[in-house]
Amino acid sequence: MSWSQRHEARITLLALAAGAPALLVALALLFFGDHSDKVRWTLAALMTLAWIGGAAALHARVTRSLQVVSALLAALREEDFSLRGRPSAGPADDVLSDVIREINGLADTLREQRLGAFEADALLRKVMTEIDVAVLAFDAQGAVRLANRTAERLLEGTGDLLGRDAAALGMSACLEGQAPRTLLTVFPGGAGPWELRRSQFRQRGLPHTLVVLTDLRRALREEERQAWQRLVRVLGHEINNSLAPIQSIAEHLGQQLALPPRERAADLDDDLAGGLEIITRRAAGLNRFLAAYARLARLPPPRLATVEVAAWVGRVAALERRVPVRGEPGPDGLLHADGDQLDQLLINLVRNAADAVLAAGDGEVTVTWQVTAGTLELVVRDDGPGLAETANLFVPFFTTKPDGSGIGLVLARQIAEAHGGALSLHNRGDGRRGCEACVRLAVHAVLPAQASA
């Protein structure tokens, strides 16, 4: 006998037991009363039939309700959420109606969740199909349990992937070793390199391994293209920075030579000699700078030599002729550095300061330095409008100038750091407009103070 049958039998026995005392009392009163035999047996039969009929009705009522609830729950178990129970038309607080309403509400909730799961599963399958990375899932025995379209293309020619062993597919290395890492394995659909990522998950209580392979060739090609673009922009920026003063000096000397001999300045020969010397020195420095870039395709390591601070500041200040550049000499010192690279650094800072002064309409550029505890602190100060944006000053290609490239400050800081120093830029703190660029470099030796331009 099943549980449901035993439950129904107990309901019947309980119903009969509930009516038995009343029946016995009624029969006792009937048979011990002053009635004829016909009346006694007729009433006894009617009471017995009513007793049995009431128990049967109670049994049918209870079991029918349980059968309805069982049918509704069975439909939910079979994921048939269309079946609904109908509450009775009785009072609103009927217990059976409450149970049926709760089951109907549960069916609505499960239907919505199932619909959401179907939509999420469809989205996941779509993403898995369209994503440009190979995704595979392996069980604990190393057999493939999931593979997207990219993985199938990667392992083309190996047949159906599902159920195949990782070793047979040449993917044993993907399940071993450190992750993430770069993988150089050659697969039928590509030679890599690949970025390998691996994680663990469980499905139906069983452990699985998820393997994701990303083709790095496209990313490397994009990085290579961007690197070349950055290199070209850096070179163009530095060439223009060096050619601008050369062009300015050459035009100035040309204008002097175009004058009649009697109108020329008395010290024209000295100007010619000095200008040609500057042009020659900048052209030679630029040639060395470009040659090093062409060999290494990056900022070349410094070629260390002795550099006098005063002479360094004086020759760079002489290159800027658009605005006054005033030097405030400090204690002279010797740097163990690459003179050409330091020239590029200071040219960028002075040029930016001059651009700021021109944007403000008037003012000057001041270059000053001091030596403290073996450290040179050189400050390029301008009377420009100051810095409105300071968070992105050293982000490559970020610029606030309409025709700027966003390279100068980045390159200047790289040069300073390559020499073990630092570069910072901030608005002036002396109550005046403008900003200050501060370069800190280690001093090799300190010389007696002397004036410099």
Image: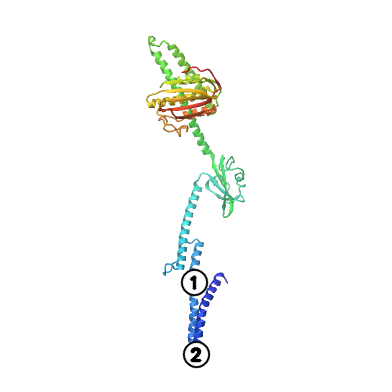
Mark 2 nearby-residue class (10 Å; few <14, some 14–19, many ≥20): few
Would you name the residue on which mark 1 appears? 62
Would you name the residue on which mark 2 appears? 37
In this rendering, does residue 367 appear at all? yes
In the picture, the quarter occupied by the N terminus is bottom right
Residue 191: mark:
none
The foreground one among 70 and 435 is 435
Give the residue type at disc 2.
Answer: Asp
Q: Residue at x 51, y 36 (%)?
A: 221
* Image: 263 above or below 189: above
Q: Residue at x 52, y 80 (%)?
A: 21
* Image: 60 above or below 412: below
Question: In this view, which residue lies farthest toward the top?
Answer: 262
The numbered mark, 2 or 1, whose residue comes first in the sequence reads 2
Q: CA distance from mark 2 to mark 1?
A: 37 Å
| Residue 267, image x, y percentages | 43, 11
Give the residue type at disc 1.
Answer: Val
Q: Residue at x 56, y 70 (%)?
A: 3
Question: Mark 2 touching mark 1, by CB under 8 A?
Answer: no
| Residue 364, image x, y percentages | 41, 23
Q: Secondary structure at mark 1?
A: helix
| Residue 416, image x, y percentages | 52, 27
320 displayed left or right of 177: left
| Residue 237, image x, y percentages | 46, 27
Q: Secondary structure at mark 2?
A: helix
193 displayed left or right of 329: right
In this rendering, does residue 239 appear at all? no
Of badges 2 and 1, nearer the viewer stands 2
Tally of numbered discs = 2
